[in-house]
Image: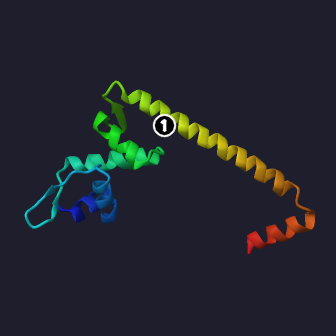
Amino acid sequence: MRIGELSRRTGVHERLLRYYEEQGLLHPERLPSGYREYDDGDIDTVRRIRSLLAAGLNTATIATILPCLRDDGDRLIPTCSDLLADLHRERDRITQSIIDLQTSLGALDVVIAAAPPDVTRRAIAALGA
């Protein structure tokens, strides 16, 4: 199938599919005309990529772990023994990001709570506008 068909079947824009190829995540066959030719397995690969992106992984990480994953219905199953260590490190990184964001949120709450009542009223009125 051509890139337009893969885009329609996965809901992923053609530009993103080309980007995935540039990042080494997709490997379409190139026809003599230069057109990309994808097979049905690429549909599953794009879905795995989208799932991993939604989980907070970047494309460089996905490129290293994608060969070690398989689909089992609606979940991904690791198939390489060293992959779990990488996934734990990514989970730890995401956890630390959440902690950092919660700290930032708390600091903002303190600043917001310190606003005088008239400033708070004006701000709330502006948000409603």
Location of the N terminus (image quadrant): bottom left
Q: Name the spot of residue 70 as percent of width and height, x first.
A: 29, 35
Name the residue at 32% across, 40% down. 66
Q: Name the spot of residue 53 as percent of width and height, x first.
A: 43, 48
Name the residue at 33% across, 44% down. 63
Q: In which quarter of the image is residue 57?
A: top left
For residue 23, above or below residue 78: below
Q: What element carries label 1?
A: helix
Q: Residues within 10 Å of mark 1 (few under 14, many from 20)?
A: some
Name the residue at 36% across, 36% down. 76
**Residue under circle 1?**
90
Location of the C terminus (image quadrant): bottom right
Q: Which colour scheme is used?
A: rainbow
Q: Residue furthest top?
A: 81
The three-letter amino acid code for the residue at tag 1 is Glu
For residue 71, above or below residue 47: above
Name the residue at 48% across, 45% down. 56
The total of numbered circles placed on residues is 1
Q: Name the spot of residue 24 as percent of width and height, x first.
A: 28, 50
Name the residue nearer the viewer: 91 or 128.
Answer: 91
Q: Name the spot of residue 17 as percent of width and height, x first.
A: 30, 59
Side of 101 where 70 appears, left or right: left
Q: Residue furthest left?
A: 32
Side of 54 where 13 appears, left or right: left
